[in-house]
Image (cartoon, grey):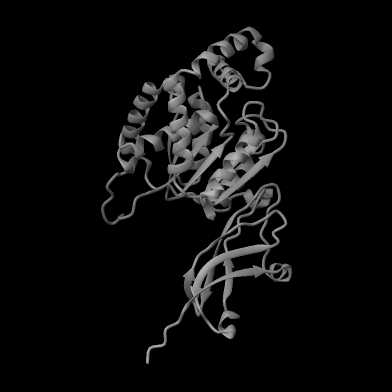
Amino acid sequence: MIKVIPQLLFTTQVSAARLRQTKPLVAKNHETYSRFTYNVHKRTYFEPRCSVSYDLLPLRCLTTASAYSESELQRVTLASSEPQSSPSSSESDLSHPQCFEGYHVVLFGWLGAQPKYLEKYADLWKSRGAKVLPYTPPITATLFPFQADRSILDFSKRMGEHVDPQPQPPRPQPPRVIYHVFSNGGFLFLGALIRATQMGLVPEWVLGSPSGIIIDSAPGEISVDMAARGVGAAAFKEGSKGFEDRFPFFVDLSRSLFQFYLNIPFIKNRIAEVKHAWEVHSPTCPQLFLFSEEDVLIPPEDIERFMLVQRNRGVQVSSNRWQGTLHVEHYREYPEEYIGQLKQFVKN
């Protein structure tokens, strides 16, 4: 006679003693979210996502599994992938020169980024085995929607030259792609690409199914003040810190212009569409946020609010929040720690 095993909905509470018996998760300077796998008799039955608080207690997983006897459930093992935050110099000293081999990394530069500045990030990835496609959309692509659409088509052509949109054996699987974007300029361009993909303006293979997204110094809420200082710093190729003190007349004039510009209906609609694309249609692959307390252009609170939105979508979110670094200058100030963050993100 066939015995029907009913389904059981249960909640597993991991105690402090249990956590101390296993290798602890690390949440030193930032929130770490990990994916856990339960195995019964060496067979995987479910893979829930678990929220990890700063003190890691309590840790709850709500999931559905086949009903087993108490003795069988005691043999259920908890295996976890444990990302490390803020790796030490010894950890970030990459012992494997080709640790990023097999990945295609797309770099979207910040507003007005010069190629020579973006090249150091390209070298970071290429020197460790990755293939890199750097792309910085023109300033006009951020300001004018029609120019953004043209830039997306231009990027699509370059992406087609960089990866094979229809891979054939012996490489039947699409390449593993990581998007590494900088500031609101790179963030908005990736959002515009997500929007264009959803609307069918570009083939789906252009965006693909990324393995991960790394966001450096973004996103920030679009405001008159942020736009005036950000566009001014990009136009004059100056750093954002102290720009208002050096060019007060230009910033005041820009504020007046952006007060009008950001209220133009089709501009407001495009900003809303890109925001919606990120919050609803963006890939649910893991995301790493790298930002700073001292960023005068993008408030860290804006980034943390967006992290919460992504986390609520089920995205695996990790981050590192530095103190004392300026906008898009974390790699320059802490190169070993920055590389360590990338390495741990790719590893997990």
Q: For residue 84, which quarter of the picture?
A: bottom right
Point 63% across, 49% down: residue: 92
Instruction: Spot the residue most to the top.
Output: 249
Locate residue 35 relative to residue 337 in the image: left or right: left
Front in this rendered view, residue 335 or 20: 20
Q: Where is residue 154? Give x, y as percent.
A: 34, 28
Front in this rendered view, residue 26 or 201: 201
The vertical placement of 191 against 93, above or below, is above
Say if residue 96 shows up in the picture: yes
- Please give the count of numbered marks on the rendered protein: 0
The vertical placement of 1 against 167, above or below, is below
Point 35% across, 39% down: residue: 198
Locate residue 302 relative to residue 28 in the image: left or right: left
Locate residue 177 relative to residue 58 in the image: left or right: left
Front in this rendered view, residue 66 or 336: 66
Q: Where is residue 113? Give x, y as percent.
A: 51, 25
Quadrant containing the C terminus is bottom right
Q: Where is residue 331? Give x, y as percent.
A: 61, 36
Q: Where is residue 137? Give x, y as percent.
A: 43, 26
Quadrant containing the N terminus is bottom left
The vertical placement of 27 against 220, above or below, is below
Say if residue 189 shows up in the picture: no
Locate residue 266 relative to residue 254 in the image: left or right: left
Q: For residue 205, which quarter of the picture?
A: top left
Point 69% across, 39% down: residue: 322
